Amino acid sequence: MMNISSQKISSFFRNKKILVTGGTGSIGERIVSTLLTYEPEQIVVFNRDDTKQYLMKQKYANEKRLHFILGDVRDYETVNFAVRGMDIVFHAAALKQVPICEENPFEAVKTNNYGSDNVIRASILNKVKKVINISTDKAINPSNTMGATKLITEKLFKQANYMLNNKDTKFCSVRFGNVIGSRGSVFPVLMNQALTGKPMTITDPNMTRFFMSIQEAANLTIKAACYCEGGETFILKMESLKLEDLSLAVQQYCLNKGLPLPVVQIVGTRPGEKLHEELLTEEELATLVEDDELYVVLPISRGGLEFRHFQPSVITLYRSDKGPKVSIEQLLAILSSYGEE
């Protein structure tokens, strides 16, 4: 099986104009920094947090291809202005914190659903070539507001390919697990607690999660743009971890650094949290193809499993407690590299 080469990726993005919504977030910024290596003509970062935008402007002060627009995806006129002239849009703007979305469901709907609808309509109107939506494993059989809004957004992006006025724009989604190092993810939370002498708060030791690095998340999103033909969902083949193993790895990390052994405090699952996550529904297995590193859910309307170099998949389940798990030793190595960043 042949994966797309770096040369082909460079060729795809060369001289393109690209918009990244939520481009100052952990994942959005990494997408931007990676795209800059592929010789685009212009990258526009669209976000609503002026402090994050100011800091990113300072970081990339000498990068003439990078431009910034302050705005909210909830505001169609601002989105429409940002999308004008773009070839490709990466839609990373979202409310993603499960507890906050659970407490503020109306706000989650406004950003994750209405905001996504604005991106879709503006992209069609401005004849953008490809639009890539960033989703999450929490969209599969969702038990919380964030996951439910992301499920709806996936469906919006899939159906956008068939809107009557859409003649030119291809839409697809990528589905993430937990992203190591992204703001609010379990890795930096536990590390910060341990390094500051606070108890490590674990919801449930038996809880399992899929995980990926920020760079893997960016690479998946960028490859999806190259592969996209309309209606696909791209999923990285990931290992999973057990929270108990992660807490043991953090404790070992502290011992190796000569730091006090952090205490583990079991706090119980938060509202809307699952014990285990899924990355595919049972229905999606019927149109699933794969290569060495990705699964791709094809739209049913395509009427077949032919898609580039990908082959039909034979897996029957993709759940975080059933698939391959990373060892405590591997987690310790990941934490050590994370702690050095």
Image (cartoon, helix red, strand yellow):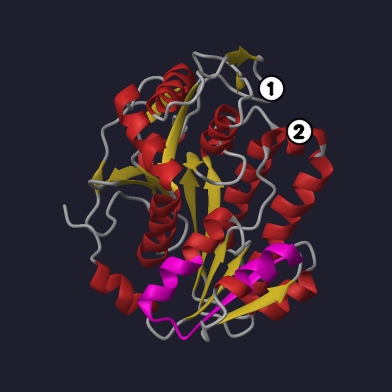
The correct choice, above or below, for 211 with respect to 213 in the image is above
x then y, percent, for residue 339: 45, 41
Which class describes the residues within 10 Å of circle 1: few (<14), some (14-19), or many (20+)? few
Answer whether residue 256 is magenta in the image.
no
> Does 173 appear above or below 236?
below
Q: Are marks 2 and 1 in contact (CB under 8 Å)?
A: yes
Q: Nearer the viewer, residue 46 or 132?
A: 46
Question: Dot 2: what SS?
Answer: helix
Q: State the residue position of label 2.
A: 102
Disc 2 residue crowd, few under 14, some 14–19, many 20+, Cα 10 Å:
some
Q: Is residue 290 left or right of residue 32?
A: left
Q: Residue at x 32, y 50 (%)?
A: 304
Amino acid type, mark 1: Arg
Q: Position of residue 203 (x, y in %)?
A: 61, 18
Q: Indicate left or right for 235 with 1 as reference.
A: right
Q: Position of residue 151 (x, y in %)?
A: 61, 42
| Residue beneath disc 1 | 270
